[in-house]
Amino acid sequence: MESVVFIFSLIDCCALIFLAVYFIITLSDLECDYINARSCCSKLNKWVIPEVIGHAVVTVLMLISLHWFIFLLNLPIATWNIYRFIMVPSGNMGVFDPTEIHNRGQLKSHMKEAMIKLGFHLLCFFMYLYRLSSCPSSLV
Amino acid sequence: QLPARVPGRGSSGAARCRPGNGWAASSGLPGPVQNQMMHSSDAQGYNPAVPGSYSHPKVPPHQPSGQYNYSGSQNVSQFNSYQGPGQTLNRPPVAPLSGSPVQQTGPVPQVPPPALQNSAAISSAGSFPPGAGPPMLSNWQYSQSAVSHPAGTPPSHLAPGTGTGSAQPSPSLSGNTNPPGSYQYAASPGGPSLHNSFMKPGSAPPPVTQPLTPLHPPPRPPLGPPPVGGPPLIRPSTLTAGPPNTHCTSSIHLKYLSSLLLATPHPSPAPPNLKMNRNVGYSYPALPPGYQNTSPPGAPGMQASALQYPDGSKHFHQPPLGTNHLTASMGSLSLQQEGLRPVNLLQERNILPTTILQAPVPNLHEDIQKLNCNPELFRCTLTNIPQTQALLNKAKLPLGLLLHPFKDLSQLPVVTSSTIVRCRSCRTYINPFVSFLDQRRWKCNLCYRVNDVPEEFMYNPVTRVYGEPHKRPEVQNATIEFMAPSEYMLRPPQPPVYLFVFDVSHNAIETGYLNTVCKTLLDNLDLLPGNTRTKIGFITFDSTIHFYSLQEGLSQPQMLIVSDIEDVFIPMPENLLVNLNENKELIQDLLRTLPQMFTKSLETQSALGPALQAAFKLMSPTGGRISVFQTQLPSVGMGALKSREEPNQRATAKDIHLTPSTDFYKKLALDCSGQQVAVDLFLLSGQYSDLASLGCISRYSAGSVYYYQSYHHKHNPVQVEKLQKELKRYLTRKIGFEAVMRIRCTKGLSIHTFHGNFFVRSTDLLSLPNVNPDAGYAVQMSVEESLTDMQVVSFQSALLYTSSKGERRIRVHTMCLPVVTTLSDVYAGADVQAITGLLANMAVDRSVSATLSDARDALVNAVIDSLSAYRSSVLSIQQPGLMAPSSLRLFPLYVLALLKQKAFQTGTNARLDERIFTMCQVKNQPLVYLMLMTHPSLYRVDNLTDEGALNINDRTIPQPPILQLSVEKLSRDGAYLMDAGSVMFLWIGKNCGQSFISQVLGVPNYGSIPQNMTHLPELETAESIRTIAFVSWLREQRPFFPILYIIKDDSPLKSSFLQNMIEDRTESALSYYEFLLHIQQQVNK
């Protein structure tokens, strides 16, 4: 059972890592003027909900399987994701708004956020991997 | 285009002075003249007449003939500029400024004089074979060929065969106000006429080389080494070998003066000439400030060459101003020191200056400052840029720029050149603040890359001298317009396309706006900026969308109704947007019948969203301008909105809906922006219409918003007049299509926030589907890398647009500011108006992203923080009271004015739409109008005198002092004019002098002043003439039409008047003195 949880978490974590890398690449494309704000934001906004769900699922899974430490580790970032999604003003086109992304250093803060998430997911990845390998049933 | 150039008044006058010289020169006679020519043969050596003799493979500079296309428009006395090189011939010691073949070690060519001088002198002296002179000039095309003008009369120069609209009589030409003719000055009196004076680049004449043949008989031996020179010609070493700076300067002065004196036949004193000419950028008598020869490469050889060629060395006009060129001006600190003088705000009662506050002058060397951009176009909050971000943070003042890039200008140099010289790495346009390392290389002032000067740029069409890249108009004008070649087009320039979208629901018809709009449109149909390609179309909507087919051959317009508003389609592919000129009758017919067509309509729904989608679909193939007239909250289809205003909650600053409720309009605006369509919104509404949501359509598509609260044709006649006047301006003002703007700044500074109506497409590229002359922009900056070792920084805005004549143009403004290292210098250079303007923009953002009260707090904190930073870090002696540097002495007053402005005030006065409209204005208005809107000017007008009056065109305009905005300044026996930008109030005191009432207002007594008086009658009395002159002078200074309300004590508008009394206390806001006390308390904490 334990191994199934971690195998699933591992896969989910991989997806989140890929997503974070995708965010970073797209944002830096915008920074370098390879794409315009409109297309960048529509690309990224598509993936905001999958990211929220992906992370929420792992967090809930950890809660259910009673891995308290991992749950608490995941909780702040999952909450932040949900909060950010909910707090989008009604007039904005999503978390990433093309008309505002160039204002007030938003691009930089988005970038920073994606970097932090990437680091976090990498950490989680190795943690899940370790738990999986140390899990007795997985060796069978 | 006839390339012929016949001297006008200026040159003929000059030629009369010295016909002999011209003759001698033309015939190449040896003699005293010859000697001079050897030194001053500016252009002659490069004459294309003898291309064969050049061994150098390079193309002579004249070859790209017709690529430069300098044309002068109206008030241009053309030949001043040609005289320059010619005059120097008379003065052997005064070396011409250009490199010349004398530099060469080879034989000094015996060459004919410059072609232009030749023809100028000769055609008037009459000793030259007719026809030979003129074509010589065809290499450089002058559009203002004054052929038809008899010499001696002020000609209104028209570009023959090009424009017609600019055929305005040149206003009182006296020769000395004239810019040089060698490039084009478009007088743009605020309208379409600007475009008319331009020439098509394609109209270049073929290169003509034969005219000089008579002067150069074939047997003449080759002229020696190619004077075109190439790099070896310009030895950097000689740069420093030049004569002392003073000598050089004076020589130019001499040359310049003489040319002017000779060029202007009437005996006007020279200094005024100098001054006037300076305005237009051609003849700066001083030296090119761009030259800072920092390093003398190859210095060893220089002495020798200088000795060997004493004359030649003078050709290297580079003034050895040295690196300290800029800081040398630090002596002129007096003005800035004044800015630092501490002022105790609590003690100084009369702090407001009695005249309009001028922008502070940056502390730059005089020569550079002279070239700097007009502060009305480009302004920085800190005219002394702090060197590091830490210093900026310490000062607690915002760093930013305020721009008005497309302002109507009376004089604008326009350059047509096949290559536009730009920095290779950062793409900065060459500007007056670059430095020339030598003749062939220039250093970008933004990224410090060293670039080559292209061959073509070596020729100066103004002076017609080769080898003077630093004298080119591009390097002499901080504001310049380029005609863009085809590289700057992604597609062929679009035609002007105007689409009008009218709300014709029951509610709209009730207001009766359609009548006014259609009539105004009908009147101004011929004045719409455009050309033969102009297209126009109409859509009306209620709960359905109506299109109008204006097909040729139809006897009357055909209406097509689309009732499927969920999935809007265009009913027919063409004839909905039609050519204005070809279908004018049908269009006029439609405009006449439109107001009557819907009078019986009972449809109350409004499908604005679908109508906009339809308009977008119609426009997207071409781009253009959509003007939407809306009178209520859109209620059906996409983009339907719900009322969010709760009148009871107006008082609390919380919970008011400043953010859009849907992203529909924003998305649509971005779609529009992508297709180069701009949407201008006219909201004429009595009820809440959610401007916060609707406004997005204009905000992100670079349109403008107009709001007429409670518009009604009968109940509110004042609004009707306002709409009429503003619509007229809107329809006839200049317009630029498919524009983009980029703002660049010196490496180390970075722009992080933009304010205004546009879409930021990529980091620094603003997408402006339409640009109009009444729009202002602001940006905020930070110092990313410290600006060590920099004495100045520069900012450049470049606006690329398609004019209504279908030309692609680039308007470039460049500003240069000094860098300082101490906090006191930062304060000394603070521009309080610009700071207030930028803070207002930031506060709008803050109130949308957070809350209104946050924004208000932020405004107050801005004052507190900056004054306490000043107190703790700059003031050495701690004094009691509230101390502020003199430059910021008005800061608390202006911030208080902002707090009391409709956009940010608390209380129940402002309706939500009105508040949001004011916020739109804050974001979109140029600084001048924003300041007037925030802090109106108050004048006493019942005792106007001619003392200190201005005299403009024989009109005497009295200049009463500006009073403080406080009721205590009002007296019952006076009359006061308050100028609040878009409105004016004339308040008549109860005991106002009888003479004023009868002689200015034209009524017998106070009691009989009508309630809704908005006009001053034109009476034959001196008082009336003075008052009207003053009011119309104020009105003329702005593009829109401020309505004048005449109010008495019992007028309903009195409250609006009193609300503008910023220094007084209101129910919900502090008085100025209380505000100061509050600030003081916080500062001294």
Image: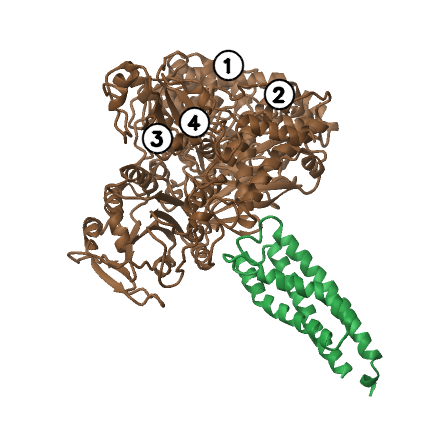
Q: Nearer the viewer, residue B1072 or B586?
A: B1072
Residue at 70% x, 41% y: name it. Answer: B785
Residue at 68% x, 56% y: name it. Answer: A112
Mark 4: amino acid: Leu
Please determine whether, in this image, residue B144 is positioned above or below residue A80: above
Rendering coords of residue B488 (x, y %): 48, 49
Q: CA distance from mark 2 to mark 1?
A: 66 Å
Determine whether the residue tagged by mark 3 lies in a helix, strand or loop. loop
- Which of the two labelled residues, at mark 2 and mark 1, occupies the earlier sequence position? 1
Q: CA distance from mark 4 to mark 3?
A: 13 Å
- Which of the two labelled residues, at mark 4 and mark 2, occupies the earlier sequence position? 4
Chain designation of label 1: B
What residue is disc 2 on? B343
What residue is disc 1 on? B32
Label 4–label 3 contact, CB within 8 A: no
What residue is disc 3 on? B145
Q: Colour of chain B?
A: brown
Rendering coords of residue B770 (x, y %): 42, 47
Mark 3: amino acid: Ser
Determine whether the residue tagged by mark 2 lies in a helix, strand or loop. strand
Residue at 74% x, 64% y: name it. Answer: A120
- Residue B273: tell me if it is visible: yes
Bin the neighbour count of mark 2 within 10 Å (Cα to Cα): few under 14, some 14-19, many 20 and up.
Answer: some
Q: Which quadrant: the C terminus of chain B? A: top right
Q: CA distance from mark 4 to mark 2?
A: 59 Å
Chain designation of label 3: B
Rendering coords of residue B674 (x, y %): 46, 56
- Which of the two labelled residues, at mark 2 and mark 3, occupies the earlier sequence position? 3
Please determine whether, in this image, residue B960 is positioned above or below residue B624: above
